[in-house]
Every structure is written in C-alpha cells, then in structure tokens.
Amino acid sequence: MPKHKLHRYADELLLGKPYGEVHRAIDRPYIFLRRKHRKMFHTPKEAYVVASLASSDPRAGLSGLLHVWIDKKCSKDKNFKKWLEIMAKEHELWKKHMALLKK
C-alpha cells in the first residue's frame, strides 16, 4: 500500500499541488477495516465523489482518481512502487534544498 507521501508527490507533479485532505478522506476506512480498507471509496466513482466532498478545489476529484490508479498500479507492480518512492524522496529533498537556498 503506497504511503500518502507518494500520492501527494503525484498530485504535485500532475495537478500542481498536493491534496492531503483527499487522500486522508479516501483512506479513512483504514481506521476500522485496516488492510481491507480499499473495499470502500476505491472505485473511480467513489474516489471522485469522496475527493470532491473532502476539498472544494475543482481538481480534487482528479486527485481521487489518481489515488485509486496509484494504489492499483503499486499493488500490481512493486518495481513501479519502488521507483515512485525514490522519485518522491528526491522531490522532497529538492524542495528542502530550494528552501535553504531562499534563506
């Protein structure tokens, strides 16, 4: 299961900003379903609706769709998940580096 850091990275890359509230809302059933939480809110239609309710941003629904796609892709392709994790970490380090340069 991908961490929210990967979802936020994909959001920034493709949608221009992270949508943490969307990913928290879609994965909220984890509290009581644990690893079976994808039984709720993880169809494209459900993810789009939940995301749109979690954020007033017009692109939130797209973030929800991206969330579902990334979950499925990472479950099927462990190499893709590892690659995405590396890219997200590099992005995080780059942002920290840029913040230091601005000081």
Image (cartoon, rainbow, N blue to C red):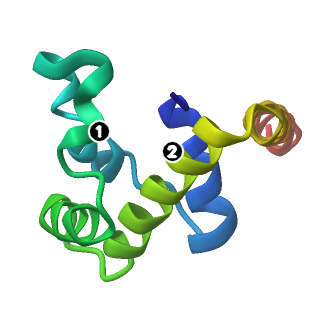
Which image quadrant for residue 102?
A: top right
Residue under the point 89% across and 40% down: 101
Query: Looking at the picture, how far across and down is residue 60, in whole percent?
Result: 34, 70
The answer to the question of whether label 2 and label 1 lie on touching residues, with beta carbons closer than 8 A, is yes
Which image quadrant for residue 96?
A: top right
Residue under the point 24% across and 72% down: 45
Q: Nearer the viewer, residue 50 or 94?
A: 50
Query: Looking at the picture, how far across and down is residue 77, in whole percent?
Result: 73, 40
Image position of 8 (left or right of 74): left
> Residue at label 1?
38
Q: Residues within 10 Å of mark 2 (few under 14, many from 20)?
A: some
Quadrant of the image containing the C terminus: top right
Image position of 51 (left or right of 91): left
Badge 1 amino acid: Arg
Q: In this view, which residue lies farthest toward the front?
A: 76
Which dot marks residue 71? 2
